[in-house]
Amino acid sequence: MLTLVEKILFVIATLVSLYFTYRGVMKIVAHISSGQGKVDWSLVWKRIGDLIVKVGLFQPVFRFRLGPSILHGLIGWGFLSFLLINLADLIYAYTGFKLLENTGLFGDIYRLIADVANVAIVGGILAMAFRRFILRPDTLSTRDTTLLHPKARAGIMRDSAIVATFIFIHNTMRFLGESFGVALAGHTDSWQPSISAVSQLWAGVDANVLVAGEHIAFWMSIGAVVAFLPYFPYSKHIHLFFAPLNFALKPERKSIGELSYINLDDQSIEQFGAAKMKDLGWEQIMDSYACIMCFRCQEVCPAYNTGKLLSPAALEINKRYHFNNGGTTDVPMLDLISEEAVWACTSCGACVDICPVGNEPMRDILDIRRNLSMMESAFPKQLESAFKGMERNQNPWNVSQGDRMKWAEGMSVPTIEQNAEPEILWWVGCAPATDTRAQKTAQAFAKILNTAGVNYAVLGKNESCTGDSARRAGREDIFFGLASQNVEILNEVAPKRIVTTCPHCLHTIKNEYPAFGGNYQVIHHTQLINELVGAGKISMNLEGDNMKVTFHDPCYLGRHNKITDAPRDDLKAAGIETVEMPRNGAKSFCCGAGGAQMWKEEEEGSARVNVTRFAEAKSTGANTVAVGCPFCLTMMTDASKADGDSMQVKDVAEIVAERLK
């Protein structure tokens, strides 16, 4: 189809484009390579099935913002098909032979797909452009108070305009070029309905004009790709390449909250946490290139939603714009996110869970905390009391270990000394053992276990804090000591199964302790209750008061450990009428206590996280909020008191214990 001169010019233009594209790509490779750790390429083959689902079906995209996700699907699936379509167009341009179109039924289907994909992409990009540039929803930007690279606010809009323009020109000109070809053939093609309909507009047009139009359309369509390639490494469009790499190569983790192991016995370690971007893992640096700047992580962030300075999206965007403006990984992390924003994070994991390209901004923040706490002793002063409590008395409440079993006075609760080989080792946790309100949860669960005749034991005075709050606050030294001590004790006990009454304990023992040599089967108390009900070991009075319950999913239960059904099944077994909050399950809104927030004052904002969540619970019309975490119990109780005790707040174990026969 192309003339010899055109073929030569196109090759030259392509080579020049590829040269500048290569330079941009090599800068990216250098930045990512400067991060910590090494790539494990063997993970690709282990994740190939999951990769096909996530990349081929855009499954992560459809978990949020359904309308825009459908539009994204139209564009994305269209582009996947256009990888083949553009190749076929190039072959035709250089040989005059339509390789894929002249193959019988396959060719017919190919032409239909090309026609539909073309229309889908153009329609999708026009709708997306209308949304971004005309409707301009707040969810596609961030507040003025957010720390954002000075070139990012205008740059994001400009980048979106460039990408949208490129897609529109590429696909409309390809569409027109095909319509000129159909018009030249002198008949319509039923397998290209849209293109054939447009070709009717060219009926009677001189053949030479149509040929010229076909050439111009090629240069504007495929030429747009060639012109766009050097910009590609600097645009958000590069997520097309890095999102699949993110899904394929992220280091294996037992949960989204599992942090990297630091051996505090290794005297050669000179840097703890991330002071500069180069201190991050290579995959955390790659996140900045995978980011599509959709702000979904910001939209679900409890800190941002309550007016705090934290925006997980802004962190990734700042990393990216720093690179695009000539920066290196030597940049201090606090140039990319404010210290106040770092301490506003509840480590709820919502940003990681919802990201459609697999980014982990929460991990960056917790690594920054490690540097601030370990290297600079720069942490909120309110945390000092909890730190001292964990160091001196093995619990953040600073209660003496000698008082660890006071909650069980008057009850039959066997310790490991009294029952050396239990079927279940109950890890009570600091809050249920020492906090007055949370002790009622422990007492209720003990009642359930005793009623069911479970063979269990507790560690009693040998039980210490798991160190969760210390680790989330960056005090890896405190966590290391507690974890090492606890694993030594647990390995000596060799429990068959461990049940916890706190999701933070569950997460730490199940997901963090394996790095210390502690591998255990760990379940949540709502899961054990569910087992006991199913086995017929406990039964309940189903005719009780008119309790209407909404269950608040703790972040470290539902999102971090994917346990959402058990607590609801427990309530159902107790004959409780339940109603869901809009944000539930893996998409639950945080109570505000995670990430060591329990021990410090909340950063200034427009609202408190726990009050915001309580208002959502109240709006359901329920008269009781059920929880499965002592931190959530405290936060929801405080919010209820501030609201005049308008709702009861109870752990699932308390509700079940009240209804036992």
Image (spheres, helix red, strand yellow):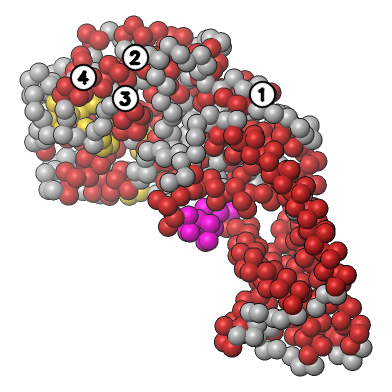
Residue on which the image places disc 3: 516
The nearer-to-camera label among 1 and 3 is 1
Q: Is residue 523 left or right of residue 560?
A: left
In this rendering, does residue 324 appear at all?
yes
Residue 125 to residue 135: above or below: below
Task: Write down the quadrant of residue 641 in the picture.
Answer: top left
Task: Write down the quadrant of residue 280 in the picture.
Answer: top right
> First in sequence: mark 1 or mark 3?
1
Membership of 497 in magenta stretch: no
Seen from the viewer's position, the closer of residues 497 and 457 is 497
Seen from the viewer's position, the closer of residues 220 and 348 is 220
Residue drawn at 41 percent across, 32 percent down:
258
> First in sequence: mark 3 or mark 2?
2
Amino acid type indicated by mark 1: Asp
Seen from the viewer's position, the closer of residues 651 and 356 is 356
Q: Quadrant of the C terminus?
A: top left
Residue on which the image places disc 1: 330
Residue on which the image places disc 2: 481
Q: Is residue 553 left or right of residue 436?
A: right
> First in sequence: mark 1 or mark 4?
1
> First in sequence: mark 1 or mark 2?
1
User: From mark 1 to mark 2, how far is it between C-alphas?
Assistant: 31 Å
Q: Secondary structure at mark 4?
A: helix
Residue on which the image places disc 4: 489
Amino acid type indicated by mark 4: Ile
Amino acid type indicated by mark 3: Phe
> First in sequence: mark 4 or mark 2?
2
Instruction: Tell me residue 489's x, y (percent).
Output: 21, 19
User: From mark 3 to mark 2, how far is it between C-alphas?
Assistant: 11 Å
Amino acid type indicated by mark 2: Gly
Residue drawn at 23 percent across, 14 percent down:
404
Q: Which mark is residue 642?
A: none
